[in-house]
């Protein structure tokens, strides 16, 4: 009896701890495997399972679908580059230049990060709409005669993408810059390196880890994003996310949708790897000649 | 040092870019005339109207219910996993499994989940929303909780054990209190993520249940209305309060 209770009580922590892993396996990994499996299904017109096939993958190698993947790639890459371009100087300013205002600046960067992003979309809607704030203001000032069409253009989509994803890029870069010893920057400047050289050879390589996590946080969701292009871009262009949702919610098109998902996810992963390789090469290029 | 002026100017421009639309939104929620008209006079009329909108309150209730359930479940599961680790389990090598939810776009997870629910014959609704949001919550909180757990001084635990406390007592009196700020921070973050989530909610909610995000998208399709402005202001106030709690020195932990 004593032996039995001893064994059971030894397993209690295991029994308490394991549900988290089970949850993750059952509701995260199995659904993902299901997508991969169902991409191989062949369904009859009534939606009945008929066997395994590679036909779905062959069907996704179509000009239309490849164009959609390219749209998403373009959107994700340009959002990431624009965010990086704005975030790097901003993170530098918060980490090194802002002294008393540092916490305030960080706090105001966090607020958009916490608010419902549809609220931001609504705010821009309000400003950019045909009868919105900007047009009304410009007309009443007499600067334009007829309202500008800003909403439902690629420009509006890009604006909203950068607006929404910027904090995700700034915060990790700021985090890694904060760990940089500011004496290093001063030493570089004192020893005769120019401003550009200091940024390229000292600041950039040392904040590379933050840049990497920033890219992860921006590039991946931007690739799958479909709400912003749909609401701001007015459905003129199709993106991966919207196509996947249409396939999966449609009648008997789920296997084709799954194949498209697998195809676009592999493009996502490969492009991400390519970006990281470019980033590493860039770091090596800037620091060439430094041991 | 040549570029002393342009950089602060640049930073100012970015903050202006981030906040100008929000400020305009807030101002016009108090305007007595509906939008295309310019500023007329101050009113709280739209806020009163907001309180009469039952569909909105229904969706807000759903969002709060889903967010709090997802937060509690994922925190509970996370703390249980920490308990397993602290009583000698080797969980560390399984933690990267939870990073998956950060790497996979939400759309793809959502698509997988709805086909999965369809196969299991689980009807879409509040339950499926709670399940899917818990997955996201686990992906955020478990890595953060474990990073903090491994940063704790192991000597504190050893001292407690050596001085005669049982492993159970050590966990509840030493480990858990030390982790409390991280647990609160993770809870707030999970709550906010779930509350703001649109993609998972859109897929996993079915046709009958509406969350606040879905309600907002639907009202967006009808164009601008001062009532939505008023709603946005209320949400902004709520968010700012949560962010202030998050930023308070007691809870402040490094998430990134």
Image (cartoon, coloured by chain):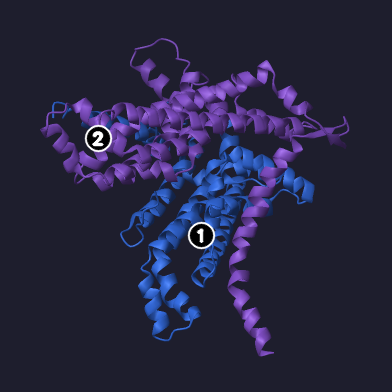
Chain colours: A purple, B blue
Quick check: can you spot residue B16? no
Question: Which residue is drawn at the image coordinates 56% and 51% (left, top)?
Answer: B97
**Closest to the observer, A278 or A237:** A278
Mark 1 element type:
helix
Residue where numbered disc 2 is placed:
A202
**Closest to the observer, A73 or B71:** A73
Residue B203: which disc?
none
Q: Exactly how many numbered labels are in the figure?
A: 2
**Residue furthest top in the image:** A145
Residue where numbered disc 1 is placed:
B92
**Closest to the observer, B229 or B157:** B157
Question: Which residue is drawn at the image coordinates 53% and 57% (left, top)?
Answer: B93
Across and down, in percent, residue A173 comes to 34, 39
Residue A79 falls in which quadrant of the image? Answer: top left
Quick check: can you spot residue B23? yes
Specify whether disc 1 shares its chain with disc 2.
Answer: no
> Between marks 1 and 2, how big is the CA–CA gap?
34 Å
């Amino acid at each position: 009896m004593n032996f039995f209770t001893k064994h059971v009580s030894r397993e209690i922590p295991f029994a308490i701890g394991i549900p988290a892993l089970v949850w993750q396996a059952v509701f995260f990994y199995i659904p993902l495997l299901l997508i991969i499996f169902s991409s191989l299904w062949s369904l009859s017109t009534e939606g009945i399972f008929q066997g395994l096939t590679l036909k779905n993958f062959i069907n996704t190698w179509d000009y239309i679908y490849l164009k959609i993947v390219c749209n998403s790639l373009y959107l994700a890459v340009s959002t990431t580059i624009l965010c990086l371009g704005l975030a790097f100087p901003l993170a530098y300013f918060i980490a090194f230049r802002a002294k008393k205002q540092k916490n305030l600046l960080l706090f105001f960067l966090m607020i958009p990060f916490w608010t419902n992003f549809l609220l931001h979309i609504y705010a821009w809607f309000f400003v950019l709409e045909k009868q919105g704030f900007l047009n009304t203001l410009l007309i009443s000032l007499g600067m334009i005669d007829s309202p500008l069409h800003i909403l439902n253009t690629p420009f509006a989509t890009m604006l909203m993408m950068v607006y929404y994803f910027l904090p995700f890029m700034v915060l990790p870069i700021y985090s890694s810059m904060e760990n940089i010893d500011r004496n290093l920057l001063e030493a570089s400047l004192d020893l005769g390196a120019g401003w550009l050289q200091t940024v390229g050879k000292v600041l950039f390589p040392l904040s590379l880890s933050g840049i990497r996590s920033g890219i992860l946080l921006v590039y991946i969701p931007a690739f799958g994003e479909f709400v912003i292009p749909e609401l701001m871009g007015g459905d003129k262009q199709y993106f991966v996310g919207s196509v996947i949702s249409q396939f999966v919610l449609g009648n008997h098109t789920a296997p084709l949708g799954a194949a498209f998902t697998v195809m676009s996810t592999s493009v996502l992963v490969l492009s991400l790897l390519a970006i990281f390789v470019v980033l590493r090469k860039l770091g090596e290029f800037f620091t060439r000649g430094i041991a | 040092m040549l570029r002393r002026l342009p950089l602060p100017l640049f930073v100012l421009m970015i903050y202006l870019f981030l906040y100008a639309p929000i400020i305009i939104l807030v101002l016009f929620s108090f305007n007595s005339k509906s939008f295309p008209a310019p500023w007329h006079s101050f009113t709280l009329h739209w806020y009163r109207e907001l309180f009469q909108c039952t569909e909105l309150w229904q969706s807000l209730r759903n969002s709060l219910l889903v967010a709090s359930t997802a937060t509690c479940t994922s925190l509970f599961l996370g703390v249980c996993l920490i308990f397993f680790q602290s009583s000698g389990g080797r969980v560390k090598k399984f933690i990267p499994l939870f990073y998956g939810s950060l790497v996979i776009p939400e759309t793809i997870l959502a698509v997988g989940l709805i086909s999965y629910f369809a196969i299991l014959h689980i009807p879409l609704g509040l339950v499926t929303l709670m399940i899917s949001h818990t997955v996201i919550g686990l992906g955020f909180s478990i890595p953060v909780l474990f990073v903090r757990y491994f940063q704790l001084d192991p000597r504190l635990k050893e001292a407690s054990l050596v001085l005669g406390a049982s492993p159970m007592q050590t966990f509840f009196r030493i480990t858990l209190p030390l982790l409390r700020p991280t647990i609160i921070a993770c809870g707030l973050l999970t709550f906010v993520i779930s509350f703001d989530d649109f993609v998972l909610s859109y897929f996993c909610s079915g046709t009958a249940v509406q969350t606040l995000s879905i309600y907002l998208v639907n009202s967006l399709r009808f164009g601008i209305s001062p009532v939505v402005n008023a709603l946005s202001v209320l949400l902004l106030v709520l968010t700012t309060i949560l962010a202030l709690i998050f930023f308070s020195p007691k809870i402040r932990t490094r998430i990134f």
